[in-house]
Each structure stands twice: as C-alpha cells, then as structure tokens.
Amino acid sequence: MSEIDRKLMQKRTLSYLGDRKQEGAFALSEEIDSCFEELEKEAHFLGCYEVYALDFDKEGFPEIPDAGVRLRSEDLKNLFASCERVCVLATTLGVSYDRYIRRIMNGNMSHGVVLDAAASAYLEGRTDAFEEELGLGERTFRFAPGYGDLDLSLNIPLLKAIRADKKLGITHTSGGLFLPQKSMLGLIGLNGETAHADLGQKTPTCLTCARREACRQKKSGSASCCFPEQTPGRV
C-alpha cells in the first residue's frame, strides 16, 4: 500500500472537525499524528472494485446494465457524458475500528472526536492510494451516493454488485448507510475525454467539483473549500 500524505491528512482532519481555516493546526498537530499511529494499529483497511460497461438511457442518464443500476443524476449525467466504463470502488477500515472508537469515546470523548475525524481523513487517504494503484488511467474523480443529487440508497445495489459484503464485510442500513461505520463507495468514470476538461484532473479541487455552482462553502463566504489541499480562498 502506498504511503499517505500526512500533511494532507492533517488538513483533512481539521476540515472534518469543522476547522476550514485550519486555525487549530498547531494546537492539534501532535494529537492528530498520534491518531494516525493509533489507526495504523487498530484499523484494517480493505478495498475492492469492479469495472463495468457504461450505457446511457434516452435522457442521457448513465446506466450500469451488468449491475442493473440506473444512475438518475444530473451531476453524473454531465460528469460521465464521455465515459465508456465505470469503476465501482468500495473501501473500509473494518469492524475493528468501530470497536476501538467505542472504547475511546467511553473513556476520553474529546480525543475520540479528534480520532473519528482523523479516521475519516485516513480512510480517504488510503482510498486515494488504493485508487492510484489500480492503474485506471484517465478518469473522473470519485463520486459517491449521497453526494450532490445522487441518492444515498444507491449504495445498496452497488455494494451488492461488487460483493462488498463478501469481500470486505460491508453491510448497510435500510437507508444506505454503511456498517462498518468508516466505509465508503465511489463511482469513477473511465475512458474517453471527460465531459469538462477540468474534471479529468486527478487531484480534486473546487474546479473539479460537480457541485461547485451550488456549494454551501462558497455561498457562506468560507475562506477555504471542501478540498483542504487547495489554496484557501481560490475557487
């Protein structure tokens, strides 16, 4: 597994804690580092994926015929417009993390809050590395159910299609939330030129975000965006 960028993980952790301006970077840096050490010991990252042919209905919405999934999303309609295939990818930190965070929360809630934010950043970083190692070539960024206008319930048929329950032990609630808690699923468009040239970049920025025109951060006047690696304030 490729190494993750610790500095980027620090920034993402602070963002998950709601510190978009990174004002707590100095005060929390040592604790966040210790959280990553804990996660290396207590979490067990696993990932799996499948690549499917992509089709489009009469309205231009993408479909995955072999998985029996229709993606009624204007965001994906635009993002995948020039794609021929789609990679469905799922990752998790496993049930061991869920057990561990419960113990920490019961004993030290303040540390547990930081640890849980760090776990989200850690999962994202490990997933980035896993995706990079797949050698998918030119691709869109990952787009997850529950993001933008893509319904969260699509997690259910997509998890079933790639057999994430058997491979990773991921199950779901009736609404599409994941069990174990720290699990994620993403759709990545492959092949052809992307619908917009800026959406083919590997590193997410405000320009690559399909929801950039409806961004709550931009509307609220936040000094930084949802992607901590981007220069604050630049959109």
Image: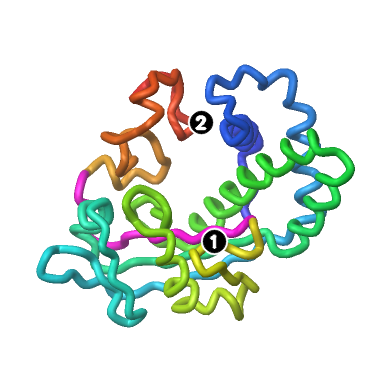
Q: What mark, if any, has residue 47 been given in the picture?
A: none
- Residue 72 placement: quadrant: bottom left
**Contact check, label 2 and label 1, Cβ < 8 Å:** no
- Residue 183 placement: quadrant: bottom right
Residue 66 vertical position relative to residue 39 in the rendered view, above or below: below
Which residue does the image show at 37% across and 59% down from the upper left?
151
Residue 5: image x %, image y %? 61, 39
| Image quarter hosting the N terminus | bottom right
Q: Which residues are magenta?
A: 182-196
Left or right of 1, for residue 68: left
Q: What mark, if any, has residue 228 been given in the picture?
A: 2
Residue 50: image x %, image y %? 44, 73
Which residue does the image show at 19% across and 58% down from the upper left?
81
**Which residue position is annotated with label 1?**
177
* Crowding at mark 2 (Cα within 10 Å: few <14, some 14-19, many 20+): many
Residue 163: image x %, image y %? 52, 79
- Residue 150 placement: quadrant: bottom left
Q: How many marks?
A: 2
Badge 2 marks a residue whose secondary structure is: loop
Left or right of 79, for residue 217: right
Nearer the camera: disc 2 or disc 1? 1
Looking at numbered disc 1 in the image, what kind of residue is underneath it? Answer: Leu
Residue 129: image x %, image y %? 56, 52
Looking at numbered disc 2 in the image, what kind of residue is underneath it? Answer: Pro
User: What residue occupies the far right of the structure in this picture?
Assistant: 107
| Image quarter hosting the C terminus | top left
Q: Earlier in the sequence, mark 2 or mark 1?
A: 1
